[in-house]
Amino acid sequence: MKLFSNTISTLENAINYANTKQKVISQNIANVDTPNYKAKEVTFKDTLNQTMEAKLTNTKHIPFSGSSSSSSKVVTRTDVAYNSNGNSVDMDKEMTDLATNQIYYNALIERISGKFNSLQTVIRGGK
């Protein structure tokens, strides 16, 4: 028996993704002047596409359950070098990604907080 709906676990996975992305962006920014440092990025689209292809087509099929640890993957960008020292960190891109990720994270936190507030209202009997 599941205590919470799939929405809460989906929000949890999305928050984990945003957290991982924040760490990777911070690492890239911290190494902006490190010679031969290759920037990293978090990929999610490939795993999402694979999951979407695994939809059930019949109620008798065994349900697909992907693990949350494989929902995002950190990859190194080796095909570019923005600086003469071999560093591939584009500071403008990293700062844009940082701001975008912060907005995404805040929206997720607001949404999961709303879910828990709804549960709290139900537990209190609507009071």
Image: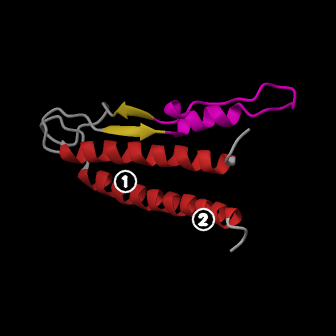
- Most foreground residue, 19 or 50: 19
The x, y position of residue 17, in whole percent, is 46, 44
Q: Residues within 10 Å of mark 2 (few under 14, many from 20)?
A: few
Is label 1 in a helix, a strand or a loop?
A: helix
Q: Of the numbered discs in the image, which one, if any, rests on residue 97?
A: 1
Q: Residue at x 53, y 35 (%)?
A: 71
Kind of residue at disc 1: Asp
The label nearer to you, 1 versus 2, is 2
Compared with 112, 10 (above or below) is above
In the displayed structure image, the side of residue 6 where residue 71 appears, left or right = left
As for residue 28 lying within the magenta part, the answer is: no
Residue 2 percent across, percent down from the top left: 70, 41
Look at the image and say whether residue 58 sits in the magenta stretch. Answer: yes
- The span shown in magenta is 44-72
The image quarter in which residue 102 lies: bottom left
> Which quadrant holds the N terminus?
top right
> How many numbered marks, from 0 up?
2
Q: Is residue 34 left or right of residue 72?
A: left
Q: Which residue is rendered at x = 41% and y = 55% of the image?
A: 101
* Residue that carries the numbered disc 2 in the rendered image: 117
- The disc at residue 29 is none
